[in-house]
Image (spheres, rainbow, N blue to C red):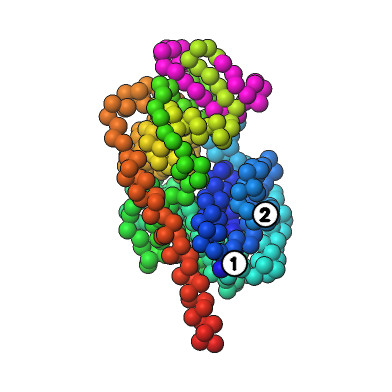
């Protein structure tokens, strides 16, 4: 099959999922003809994506979430303003998607939660089947457990998920754990998509906590806790461009500039991970058998859902702040889920190929009838 990817460029999660899917498809003899990635001002697509997806990459203008300064959560007003301000660029992005699909003529489109995917289907009435892949589609499942008193937020996030998958033939919902699928809702529950580098890592246990923060201003919370607990060794990854790649605060606290390879090596050897509640980060820790303290980004409902679902799945514990005493108290009670999670993950390749190749079988059957 000749397949085209549509990928949301915000964050690294959807990008790494696309890379993992491309590896599965190529290994099975399929061709990823192109990957189209939504970009916006200030959003840089990492170089590793073009290197590892192994297909021509096209960029188009797409909406993005605007965050408040100092990592204080989502700025809804600025997000909506940007959407209205840049509407002409977004319409041009939709046209570019259509023209590229017309040129390539793929047998199947796979969308990784790209905002324009459903809109493209509605506006252009494409006859090419589309499969949508994301953890967010699990939130459409009737058995998903949401935070209390969150009806309005549920409606908003699920409306967006439906928007991204309008007229799609199937939603592949990535999940921490096995849940029965709901074909009536076009939801097939599948394991996570992880980078090969994670799966190939050898794990050991060294005496330090690994901390990943989305904004270097959060280091204030880390330092404050550290000064009261200097005996606990911490390695923290941040985005502070004003200091060296490795900033040694003192003997037991070191800050590192974000580096994917270095981060994975430390993840494989840490005692526990403290991070925001991104789906991929938690999955990586679960695969490597590392307990996790999940700290959702403020006013980020999806991360609140991820944290709750992660706790239910046995990943670890959640906290409103970077108070590392929470993970310290939790560790003696943690039950390692690595074996169970790995068994679920390793069923994934066969499940993905079965779901995707079913469209190849259908198209060949239709051609034979004609």
How many other residues sit within 10 Å of disc 1, few (<14), some (14-19) or many (≥20)?
Answer: some
Circle 1 SS class? strand
- Between the residue at mark 2 and the residue at mark 1, the CA separation in whole angstroms equals 15 Å
Residue 153, position in %: x, y? Answer: 44, 47
Residue displayed at 53% across by 22% down: 219
* Observer able to see residue 228: yes
Q: Residue at x 44, y 18 (%)?
A: 233
Above or below, 333 relative to 145: above
Image quarter for residue 328?
top left
- Splitting the image into 4 quarters, where does residue 305 fall? top left
**The N terminus appears in which quarter of the rendering?**
bottom right
Q: Residue 40, image x and y in percent?
A: 67, 46
Which of the numbered marks, if any, corresponds to residue 62? Answer: none
Q: In the rendered view, tell whether residue 4 sits above or below residue 135.
A: below
Instruction: State the image coordinates of residue 34 (x, y, percent, origin top left).
Output: 64, 59
Q: Which residues are magenta?
A: 224-248
* Residue 2: assigned label: 1
- Residue under label 2, please give it: 57
Q: Where is residue 295, by image quadrant?
A: top left
Q: Is residue 96 above or below residue 229?
A: below
């Amino acid at each position: 099959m000749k397949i085209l990817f549509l990928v949301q460029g915000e964050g690294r999660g959807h990008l790494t999922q696309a890379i993992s899917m491309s590896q599965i498809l190529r290994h099975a003899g399929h061709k990823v003809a192109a990957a189209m990635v939504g970009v916006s001002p200030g959003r840089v697509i990492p170089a590793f994506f073009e290197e590892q997806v192994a297909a021509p990459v096209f960029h188009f203008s797409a909406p993005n979430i605007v965050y408040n300064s100092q990592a204080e959560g989502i700025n809804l007003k600025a997000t909506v303003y940007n959407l209205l301000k840049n509407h002409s660029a977004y319409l041009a992005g939709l046209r570019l998607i259509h023209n590229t699909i017309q040129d390539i003529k793929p047998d199947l489109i796979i969308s990784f939660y790209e905002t324009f995917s459903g809109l493209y289907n509605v506006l252009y009435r494409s006859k090419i089947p589309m499969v949508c892949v994301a953890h967010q589609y699990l939130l459409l499942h009737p058995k998903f457990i949401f935070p209390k008193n969150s009806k309005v937020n549920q409606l908003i996030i699920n409306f967006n998920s439906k928007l991204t998958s309008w007229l799609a033939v199937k939603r592949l919902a990535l999940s921490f754990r096995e849940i029965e699928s709901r074909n009536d809702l076009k939801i097939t529950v599948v394991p996570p998509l992880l980078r090969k580098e994670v799966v190939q890592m050898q794990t050991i246990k060294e005496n330090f906590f690994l901390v990943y923060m989305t904004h270097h201003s959060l280091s204030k919370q880390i330092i404050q806790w550290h000064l009261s607990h200097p005996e606990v060794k911490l390695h923290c990854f941040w985005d502070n461009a004003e200091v060296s790649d490795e900033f040694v605060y003192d003997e037991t606290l070191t800050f590192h500039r974000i580096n994917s390879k270095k981060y994975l090596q430390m993840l494989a050897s840490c005692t526990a991970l403290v991070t925001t509640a991104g789906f991929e980060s938690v999955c990586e820790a679960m695969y490597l058998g590392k307990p996790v303290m999940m700290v959702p980004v403020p006013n980020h409902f999806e991360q609140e859902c991820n944290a709750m679902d992660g706790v239910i799945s046995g990943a670890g514990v959640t906290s409103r702040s970077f108070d590392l005493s929470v993970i310290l108290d939790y560790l003696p009670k943690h039950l390692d889920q690595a074996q169970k999670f790995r068994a679920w993950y390793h069923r994934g390749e066969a499940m993905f190929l079965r779901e995707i190749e079913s469209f190849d079988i259908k198209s060949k059957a239709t051609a034979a009838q004609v």
